[in-house]
């Protein structure tokens, strides 16, 4: 960075930003949380979930890839954008088979936590009830596609962080699935539980075995503080 | 098809090389030679390209002309386009099922034929149509089914039916006499920057539908930093009802290549690529011959038209069945051997496009216009059309009219007048711009075809008063469900939900609340989707809701709520699974 600062206005608050920074990064640096699911700071942005969509100078655009320009006016935490985000969350819930009460990711699941944060109740859309395969062949990790939201974090993490490309997409449209690098299943791939790809799943789709329910209720990641609170903490601390 | 995939793939790669970017070519040829892409083939391709098998699968599983399960010796793909349906494709389908003895989606027991549906094949003016192993069958009737099936069963070689160009009206820009090389020579009299200025002065706008100023696009690309520059011709018109590019590359391929060469000169590009949609594979050979002739004439090659330092050549990339690849950044992904998922912008292709280099992607017709502008001048061009839409536009007209086909007309023609020209009577609705365009009612027929009023990439589909518009909206929505790339959630899931809602409405069980939900859903898809195509995928629903509200209201049941599921059916299914019946109907068994 040249050190030169830009300024953008997000939900009426002026914040500094660097040249080349994305809207999401600039907001985050200023302690403003923009909802997201497929984004992860360790990975190149994917643009899959669209939850980070904001209006930049009046035009909807995803904050994870759009870079800031000086004086940009951003609307994020508005009734309109949050309503659209809830609709996308509802879509993700009906697309797969998500049963929070007995999912080991419950309480630490980003999908669930965002639904709570944005005030989603029951999805208004009809469920698809797809038949999805569970692959528990690997000794240390399993993938349950019922809980997959196709955020592609595993694909990017395995390719770019682990250098293994264990995961990929397969098919297209509503039939898209996560594929693994062997017809025999996860056990026949190079995946290790220590891989970032095994650890960055936002839901309970890719899970490390033998850790379920170890964290007691009340101490799970989002039990006491909503998702995004860690980012917003910076702002309250500074302010 | 008893050949060893390993040796076949090695043979293919001796020609294509082991460049990962050629994966689509390799996969297409494996498909053609072996009938499908087996796990063994995936492994062999991955090994030769030095990538993981899951990455090969990622690409090949995306394209509908590439099959990951074994298919028959021949695959018949019947176009499920709306125009075909209006001309009796359902009866053709039934006759094919009867003759082949298998339903669609299956392969005959002897392994001879696989029957499948496919998206619009660009033959809407001569539908129903089908593709058999890359060859085109048009104007199908139920009585043709026996001959087709017999031919396939006995493995007799298949001859393509004649594809008509159906040019109903020629104009001065596209379908005018062509002096090969004249436009290039005219361009070479100017500096590249002057060429761009002339195109800008002609106020040429992209003919694919979006209408971006071509001169500006070329200028951005020329000024962008990069080691190489590329000029891509987008000949992947997959939008239902669009077939004008097929007619251009059939009738005036030289004009297209002329425009590409001028673009190459203006940008400083050495390489042009024409991306030909897989459905038009039957034109591939003749296009290669045209390119070869142009090389012989010195219109392509090391020094084009004898100009030292201006080297330019063109290659053709054939697609493999994916509408989304008509979106320019998805097309670039496909060209690089990947799944055709659009990219996030910025960066725009003019900054970082093909192989991360500055790239211009232009529509076939746009490049033809560029060639004519250089030949005849911007002043000549701007005399035609309207202030914001200069020149002529090719319209591909299908549906209820006497003279379906291609028309070259000046921008600004009033739709009412167009309907007279094509011989349309008792019109109920006109779909302007294909499924991603708008469904117009009679009250809107005073609109003009131009970017500032009713904009279209070329598709005009006409529906008369005998048609059920809501069924058509459902079919147009199905098109998006099948052709959504699946990358982003709102388009992937939202289009499938729109279809579910349309089904509920058509079943007669919807209430007013469903219409409110339908509109809200459509708006979410429009606002939140990633690419231009996703953002327009709710247009059939949204524009018909706006223009035909009464057609929807007529189908509404009274009351505030009706369930999304059929409760009776759900109970029957539960009974079957549990082996029990509700106590009111005879108690437990």
Image (spheres, coloured by chain):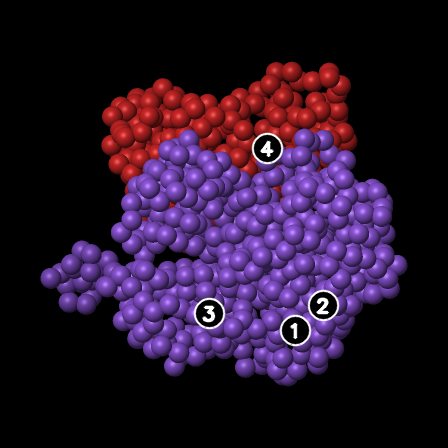
| Coordinates of residue B585 in the picture (x, y in percent) | 19, 67
**Which of labels 1 and 4 is toward the front?**
1
Rounded to the nearest angstrom, the CA distance separating label 1 from label 4 is 47 Å
Secondary structure beneath disc 4? loop
Q: What residue appears at the point 45 percent right and 61 percent down from the top-left corner?
A: B134
- Label 4 near label 1: C-beta < 8 Å? no
Looking at the image, tell me whether mark 2 or mark 3 is earlier in sequence order: 3
Chain of the residue on which disc 2 is drawn: B
Q: Would you say B399 lies left or right of B502 here?
A: right
Secondary structure beneath disc 2? loop
Q: Are marks 2 and 1 on the same chain?
A: yes
Rounded to the nearest angstrom, the CA distance separating label 2 from label 1 is 9 Å
Chain of the residue on which disc 4 is drawn: A
Viewer-proximal residue among A129 and B510? A129
Q: Which residue in the structure is indicated by mark 4?
A: A64
Q: Which residue in the structure is indicated by mark 2?
A: B175
Picture layout, residue B397 above or below residue B287: below
- Chain A drawn colour: red
Secondary structure beneath disc 1? strand
| Coordinates of residue B383 in the picture (x, y in percent) | 86, 64
Crowding around mark 3 (Cα neighbors within 10 Å: few <14, some 14 to 19, many 20+) is some
Q: Would you say B140 lies left or right of A99 here?
A: right
Q: What residue appears at the point 39 percent right and 65 percent down from the top-left corner?
A: B76
Q: Let me know if residue A129 appears in the view.
A: no
- Label 1 near label 2: C-beta < 8 Å? yes
Residue ranking furthest to the right = B379
Residue ranking furthest to the left = B589
Q: Quadrant of the N terminus of chain A?
A: top right
Q: Are marks 4 and 3 on the same chain?
A: no
Chain of the residue on which disc 3 is drawn: B
Q: Which residue in the structure is indicated by mark 1?
A: B167
């Amino acid at each position: 960075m040249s050190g030169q600062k830009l300024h953008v206005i997000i939900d009426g608050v002026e914040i500094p930003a660097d040249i080349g920074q994305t809207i999401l990064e600039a907001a985050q640096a200023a302690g403003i949380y923009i909802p997201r699911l497929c984004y992860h700071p360790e990975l190149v942005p994917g643009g899959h979930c669209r939850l980070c969509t904001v209006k930049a100078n009046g035009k909807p655009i995803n904050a994870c890839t759009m870079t800031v320009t000086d004086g940009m006016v951003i609307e994020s935490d508005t009734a309109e954008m949050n309503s659209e985000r809830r609709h996308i969350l509802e879509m993700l819930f009906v697309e797969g088979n998500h049963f929070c009460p007995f999912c080991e990711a419950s309480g630490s699941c980003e999908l669930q936590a965002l639904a709570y944060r944005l005030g989603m109740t029951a999805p208004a859309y009809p469920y698809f009830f797809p038949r999805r395969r569970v692959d528990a062949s690997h000794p240390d990790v399993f993938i349950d596609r019922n809980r997959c939201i196709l955020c592609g974090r595993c694909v990017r993490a395995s390719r770019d962080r682990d250098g293994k490309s264990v995961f990929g997409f397969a098919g297209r449209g509503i039939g898209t699935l996560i594929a693994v690098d062997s017809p025999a299943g996860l056990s026949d791939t190079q995946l290790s539980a220590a891989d970032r790809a095994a650890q960055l799943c936002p839901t309970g789709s890719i899970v490390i075995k033998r850790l379920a329910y170890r964290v007691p209720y009340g101490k799970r990641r989002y039990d006491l503080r909503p998702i995004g609170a860690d980012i917003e903490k910076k702002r309250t601390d500074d302010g | 098809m008893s050949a060893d995939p390993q040796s076949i793939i090695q043979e293919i790669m001796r020609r294509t090389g082991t460049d990962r970017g050629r994966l689509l070519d390799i996969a297409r040829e494996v498909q053609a030679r072996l009938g499908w892409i087996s796990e063994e083939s995936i492994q062999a391709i991955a090994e030769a390209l030095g990538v993981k098998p899951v990455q090969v699968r990622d690409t090949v599983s995306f394209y509908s002309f590439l099959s990951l399960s074994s298919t028959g010796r021949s695959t018949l793909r019947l176009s499920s386009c709306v125009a075909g349906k209006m001309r009796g494709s359902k009866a053709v389908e039934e006759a094919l099922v009867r003759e082949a003895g298998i339903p669609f989606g299956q392969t005959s027991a002897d392994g001879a034929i696989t029957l499948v549906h496919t998206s619009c094949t660009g033959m809407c003016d001569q539908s129903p149509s089908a593709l058999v192993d890359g060859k085109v069958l048009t104007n199908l009737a139920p009585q043709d089914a026996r001959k087709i099936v017999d031919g396939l069963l006995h493995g007799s070689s298949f001859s393509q039916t004649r594809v008509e160009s159906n040019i109903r009206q020629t104009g001065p820009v596209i379908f005018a006499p062509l002096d090969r090389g004249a436009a290039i020579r005219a361009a070479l009299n100017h500096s590249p920057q002057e060429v761009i200025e002339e195109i800008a002065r002609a106020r040429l706008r992209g003919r694919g539908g979006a209408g971006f100023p071509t001169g500006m696009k070329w200028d951005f690309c020329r000024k962008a930093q990069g080691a190489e520059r590329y000029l891509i011709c987008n000949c992947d018109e997959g939008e239902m009802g669009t077939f004008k590019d097929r007619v251009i590359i059939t009738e005036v391929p030289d004009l297209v290549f002329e425009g590409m060469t001028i673009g190459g000169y203006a940008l400083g590009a050495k390489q042009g690529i024409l991306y030909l949609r897989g459905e038009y594979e039957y034109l591939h050979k003749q296009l290669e011959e045209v390119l070869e002739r142009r090389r012989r004439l010195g219109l392509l090659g090391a020094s084009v038209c004898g100009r030292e330092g201006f080297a330019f050549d063109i290659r053709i990339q054939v697609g493999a069945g994916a509408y989304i690849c008509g979106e320019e950044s998805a097309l670039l992904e496909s060209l690089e051997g990947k799944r055709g998922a659009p990219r996030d912008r910025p960066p725009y292709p003019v900054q970082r496009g093909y192989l991360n280099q500055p790239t211009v992607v232009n529509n076939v017709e746009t490049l033809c216009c560029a060639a004519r502008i250089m030949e005849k001048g911007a002043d000549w061009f701007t005399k035609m059309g309207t202030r914001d839409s200069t020149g002529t536009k090719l319209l591909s007209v299908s549906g209820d009219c006497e003279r379906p086909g291609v028309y070259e007309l000046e921008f600004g023609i009033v739709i009412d007048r167009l309907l007279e020209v094509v011989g349309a009577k008792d019109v109920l609705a006109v779909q302007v711009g294909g499924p991603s365009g708008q469904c117009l009612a009679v009250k809107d027929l005073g609109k003009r075809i131009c970017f500032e009023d009713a904009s279209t990439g070329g598709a005009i589909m006409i529906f008369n008063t005998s048609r059920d518009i809501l069924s058509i909206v459902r079919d147009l929505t199905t098109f998006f469900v099948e052709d959504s790339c699946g990358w982003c959630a709102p388009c992937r899931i939202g289009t499938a939900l729109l279809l579910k809602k349309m089904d509920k409405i058509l079943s007669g069980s919807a209430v007013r609340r469903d219409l409110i939900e339908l509109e809200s859903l459509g708006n979410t898809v429009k606002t939140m989707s990633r690419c231009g195509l996703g953002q327009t995928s709710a247009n059939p629903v949204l524009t018909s809701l706006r223009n035909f509200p009464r057609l929807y209201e007529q189908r509404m049941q009274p009351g505030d709520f009706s369930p999304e599921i059929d409760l009776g059916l759900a109970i029957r299914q539960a009974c079957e699974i549990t082996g029990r019946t509700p106590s009111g109907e005879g108690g437990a068994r």
